[in-house]
Amino acid sequence: MSKKQVWYEVQEDETIEQCLQRMSEDGYSVCGRKEEPLFHLVDGEPTYLRQKIQFKGILREE
């Protein structure tokens, strides 16, 4: 049985469109989005690495 709500993260090697396609293939529709910056330490200083993007999916009724 599938969960009614699932968070999908856009992977480093995929586009937003590819992530949305993956959600659709799994039977989910987008109902939310959140972003947060990811940092890593360089010489003891936090440095911006990339943006973490997630989409909230709701299971479609068939």
Image: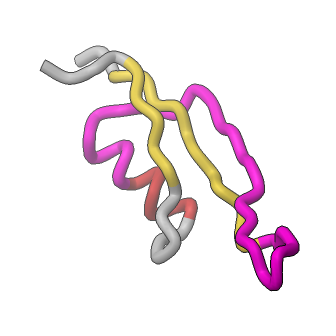
Magenta region includes residue 14: no
In the figure, 50 relative to 6: above or below?
Answer: below
Magenta stretch: helix, strand or loop mostly: strand
Q: Residue farthest to the bottom?
A: 43
Colour mapping? secondary structure
Asked whether, in this view, residue 6 is left or right of residue 1, the answer is right
Q: Residue farthest to the left?
A: 1
Q: Residue farthest to the right?
A: 45
Asked whether, in this view, residue 30 is left or right of residue 48, the answer is left
Please count the marks in the image: 0
Q: Residue at 20% x, 23% y: name it.
A: 2
User: Which corner quadrant of the image does residue 28 belong to?
Assistant: top left
Q: Which residues are magenta?
A: 22-48
Q: Position of residue 46 (x, y in %)?
A: 83, 69
Between residues 21 and 8, which one lies in front from this camera angle? 8
Magenta region includes residue 29: yes
Q: Position of residue 32 (x, y in %)?
A: 62, 30
User: Which corner quadrant of the image does residue 8 belong to?
Assistant: top left
Asked whether, in this view, residue 9 is left or right of residue 34, the answer is left
Q: Quadrant of the C terminus?
A: top left
In the figure, 27 relative to 24: above or below?
Answer: above
Q: Quadrant of the N terminus?
A: top left
Q: Residue at 81% x, 71% y: name it.
A: 48
Q: Residue at 38% x, 44% y: name it.
A: 23
Q: Residue at 74% x, 65% y: name it.
A: 39
Between residues 37 and 15, which one lies in front from this camera angle? 37
User: Which corner quadrant of the image does residue 15 belong to?
Assistant: bottom right
Q: Position of residue 26 (x, y in %)?
A: 26, 41
